[in-house]
Amino acid sequence: MLSLDTPVPPRAITLKQALARQWPILTTEQSRHVDRVAIAKHGVSGWALMQNAAAACVEQIRALIDGRRVGICVLCGPGNNGGDGYVIARDLALDGHRPVAVCVSDPNRLKGDARLAFQEAERRGVRIESWTQFQSAAFATRIRAEGDIGLVVDALLGTGAHGAPRDDVAGAIHWANEFNVGDESERMRARKFLRIAIDVPSGWDADTGHSHEPTFQADLTLTFVTPKPGMVVAVQGHGQGEHGHGSGEPLGQVRVLDIALPATAKRELGIPDHPSVEPDTHST
């Protein structure tokens, strides 16, 4: 059984903890500014940021899996959120898992770091299927073969998208929200199947908290660097969640991840260290 009630691994804090510590709340544009500053002024490449973000997510997923055999599907979109997904799939494959990365876009149209991430996953032998190739029944069979435990990871749109998801992306979200493993549906509700959103659930507006139709319904959202304004709206509207982690549909539980920004960049941008991250006293 997969549980979200275990201690949060290092390099992450819950949304409730972040709000209690008066963590900065950054809009989509302010979050982009963090990336621009890290790249332009602190020598961090976009590719390094993507790998750091994916590594932080995989650290959380490893703790959830806890050594179990798990069927994993990573839904990858056309931009950098999709790139995060390909790197997550690569790193999970290097751990010995057998994730399927579902390319919900034309891979020939991927650009920059997202394209590099796709190529890296391919080079490492990750199973990559297009959305038209992907068979839900085959994935259900794979979950049963992997001990009836499954994860679907949403790396479709991220914070950069506006408006309602369309076309294949919308279809992938509908599939993820409705997916069950046939006769295993009762056990899936017993936390043997989890939906995880990377940065924000696809279809959800990070600045306003508005859910478009469709929106990925996450059990766990792994957001980067700081909470987003819409998360505060969600918590205020739905309370602090059953276990005090700070949650609200469609976010599920929210964890704020450290993605190893340089200490100098954090100081410049007013971003505190996570409690589990030792400050870099050697940085100037």
Image (cartoon, rainbow, N blue to C red):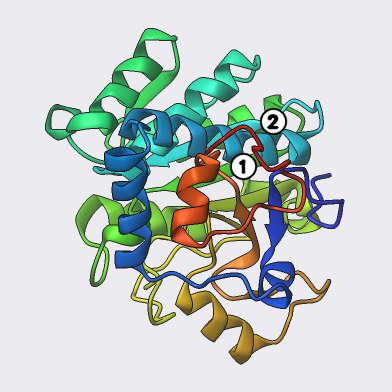
Three-letter code, disc 2: Val
Q: Earlier in the sequence, mark 1 or mark 2?
A: 2
Residue at 35% from the left image edge and 31% from the top image edge = 43
Q: Are marks 1 and 2 in contact (CB under 8 Å)?
A: yes
90 over 133 or under it: above or below: above
Residue extending furthest right?
6
Q: Identify the residue at horizontal 66%, vertical 37% (top origin).
A: 281
Q: Secondary structure at mark 2?
A: loop
Q: Which residue shows up at 58% across the image and 40% down it?
A: 57
Q: Which mark is residue 151?
A: 1
Q: Say which residue appears at 34% left-offset and 25% top-offset.
A: 117
| Label of residue 227 in the image | none
Q: Quadrant of the N terminus?
A: top right
Residue 161 at what x, y percent from top left? 26, 61
Q: Position of residue 171 (x, y in %)?
A: 32, 55
Instruction: State the image coordinates of residue 136 (x, y, percent, origin top left).
Output: 46, 40
What percent of the width, then of the height, locates residue 24? Answer: 54, 71
